[in-house]
Image: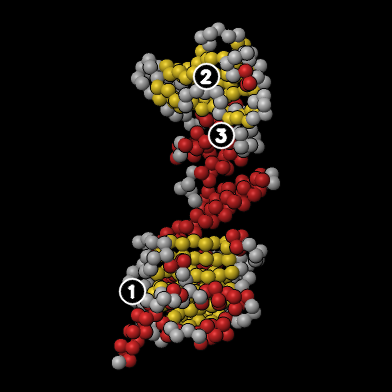
Amino acid sequence: MVRNLSILLFIGLLFSNDHSVSRPVNTYSIVAYDDSTGQLGVAVQSHWFSVGSLVPWAKAGVGAVATQSLVKVEYGPEGLKGMEDGKVPHVILSELLSNDEGKDLRQVAMIDANGNVAAHTGDKCIAAAGHQIGNNYSVQANIMENATVWPAMARAFERSKGDLADRMMAALEAAEREGGDLRGKQSAAMLIVSGEPTGIQWQDNILDLRIEDHPTPLKELRRLIRINRAYEHANKGDHYLEINKIDEAMIEYDKASKYYPENPELPYWSAVTLAGVGDVDEALPIFQQVFEKEPKLRELTPRLVDAGLLPDDDDLIRSILEVGVAFADQSVFRMELINERNYPIFVGRSGYHNINAGQTQLFFKVRGVTGLDKTERIEWKTKNSFSWNDGTRTKDYPVVNSFTYTKNGFGESLVGLPPEMKGTSVVIYGYYRDQVDSLRVFVQ
């Protein structure tokens, strides 16, 4: 009879109209405080979809909460509010449990910004279930393969080195080595808040990662922690670059690349920074390695000029775009400006074309020469930004066609130079295979 009443209570809570008691998230987790940094954190793994949306709660300078088993989500925000109001965790938890008919099915842990800890494992939490409180932490678990899970988590947290993310990750991995969740694994999450609260949540949440549904969520969580660290350094590098501290920026970009070597974009921005301050010889080998891994970043490079991230220096841009281009086994691609209407043109020693603006639009052709008979594609891009006579700004004018196909080794695109371009210039780039050429036209 008692057993039947327990089952009815469980089902009643599970399907109650009170949505706060309807999530059976059975799992293992840790709440912890780092007394060296003031950081607070929660980490969790479960055989339940999107465990990170229910279990972990934390607020900088206040505390952290894990609410699980048959989750009553309110333990999270109400626990944080109580700590913010100055109550210690064991008082808050006692008050919340005293008003909860389903307390025997709850598992909750709380820790405040002073390292005070409280935890509760209800008598009817599914075995194996339990918790262990230690110095500045609590570990808790239910529906475990073995009752050794939470003691193993505690040992791992106490013995591990590193920052709070490293130590909480060690606790989760220790749980899995002991057998973990009896049902398997599905999702994981880690939330860490700053020890120096600003009151601005996106600044105070220094790590907020969720693995919603994955066959090996802890491996994926560890990978994302590593990537998160890479971007922390990249962001610091961007900050130093903004305030013109180039050496400091390069140190941060280098650290970012080491944390996430499989992503070529991180060293790319290091190369951009070097090129931008004139260290071209040091930048070009990095560009070459990057372009080999991700050719699209070569295409991105000329666009950085208008954004102010690279100097408006055609020789510099050409040297970057041509780095690593092999010409041994193929004809050298080149571009020509075709003046079929015999407009007066002066070509300077630098190869730049100087054209007098007309009363009406002037028409030319830009020709790409490949030297190969087979039909191939040439992409055309332009780099300029100027104001029309009425003050309207424009970009990417005047190439008419964005690409063309070659015939007998030649590919052409029509170019129109309207009178409004007087006093401006345009650089036209041609991309053929892994080669690039360009020509600049000044409209006088």
Identity of the residue drawn at 62% across and 18% down: 419
Q: Is residue 422 above or below residue 22?
A: above
Name the N-terminal-most of marks 2 and 3: 3
Callout 1, which amino acid? Leu
Identity of the residue drawn at 41% across and 62% down: 212
Q: Position of residue 285 (x, y in %)?
A: 53, 36
Which residue carries the number 3 mark? 303
Which residue carries the number 1 mark? 182
Do tag 2 and tag 1 residues touch (Cβ < 8 Å)? no
Residue in front for this viewpoint, 159 or 260 = 260
Quadrant (top left, top right, bottom left, bottom right) of the N terminus = bottom left
Q: Position of residue 82 (x, y in %)?
A: 60, 78
Q: Position of residue 169 (x, y in %)?
A: 47, 67
Which residue carries the number 2 mark? 415
The local secondary structure at tag 2 comes to strand
Callout 2, which amino acid? Val
**Residue found at the very far bottom of the displayed protein:** 1
Image side of residue 179 versus residue 121, left or right: left
Identity of the residue drawn at 32% across and 72% down: 183
Residue in front for this viewpoint, 16 or 229 = 16
